Image (cartoon, helix red, strand yellow):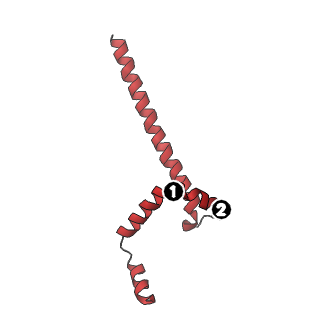
Amino acid sequence: MQLKAFWKLFSSIARNKATDDLYFILAEREAGFALILFGFLVGLPAPPAGITLRLLPFMENDIKRLRIRDESMDDLFGDLARMLMG
C-alpha cells in the first residue's frame, strides 16, 4: 500500500513539473513571437507586412497588455510634444 501512495505522489509531482515546464516554454515562445512581429520597435528587421498582418490576431492579448501599460505610464516628453504640436 505504501508503494502505491509513493507512486501516486511521484506521478503527481512529475505531472506538475511537466505542466510548469510547458507553461514556461509557451511563455518564452510567445515572447519570441512578439519580438518577431514587433522587433522593428527595437531595431530588428521587420517581417513582410502580409505575414505580420496575418499573425497579428494571435497577438491580441499582448496588444491589449501593451495598451494598458501605455495608458498607465506617464510620458512627460510625449505630453510636451503634444502641447508644442498643438
Q: Where is residue 9 in the image (x, y as percent from the top left)?
A: 36, 22
In what element is the residue under mark 2?
helix
Residue at the image position 64 percent from the left and 59 percent from the top: 51
Q: Quadrant of residue 39?
A: bottom right
Q: Where is residue 1 in the image (x, y as percent from the top left)?
A: 33, 10
Q: Where's the C terminus, which quadrant?
A: bottom left
Instruction: Please name the residue that numbered disc 1 is placed on.
Output: 59
What is the crowding at mark 1: few (fewer than 14 residues within 10 Å), some, or many (at least 20)?
few
Say left or right for 19 vs 5.
right
Residue at the image position 35 percent from the left and 68 percent from the top: 72
Residue at the image position 39 percent from the left and 26 percent from the top: 12
Q: Where is residue 67 in the image (x, y as percent from the top left)?
A: 42, 65
Q: How far apart are marks 1 and 2 (CA)?
A: 15 Å
Q: Which of marks 1 and 2 is nearer the N terminus?
A: 2
Q: Where is residue 65 in the image (x, y as percent from the top left)?
A: 42, 60
Q: In which quarter of the image is residue 7?
A: top left
Q: In the rendered structure, which amino acid carries the disc numbered 2? A: Gly
Image disc number at residue 20: none
Q: Does 84 appear above or below 61?
A: below
Residue placed most toward the observer, 86 or 5: 86
Q: In the rendered structure, which amino acid carries the disc numbered 1? A: Met
In what element is the residue under mark 1?
helix
Instruction: Please name the residue that numbered disc 2 is placed on.
Output: 50
Q: Does 29 appear above or below 75?
A: above
What is the crowding at mark 2: few (fewer than 14 residues within 10 Å), some, or many (at least 20)?
few
Q: Does 49 appear above or below 31?
A: below
Residue at the image position 48 percent from the left and 57 percent from the top: 60
Asked whether disc 1 touches disc 2, contact meaning CB atoms under 8 Å apart, the reply is: no
Question: Which residue in the rendered view is the most extreme toward the top?
Answer: 1
Q: In which quarter of the image is residue 3?
A: top left
Residue placed most toward the observer, 39 or 52: 52
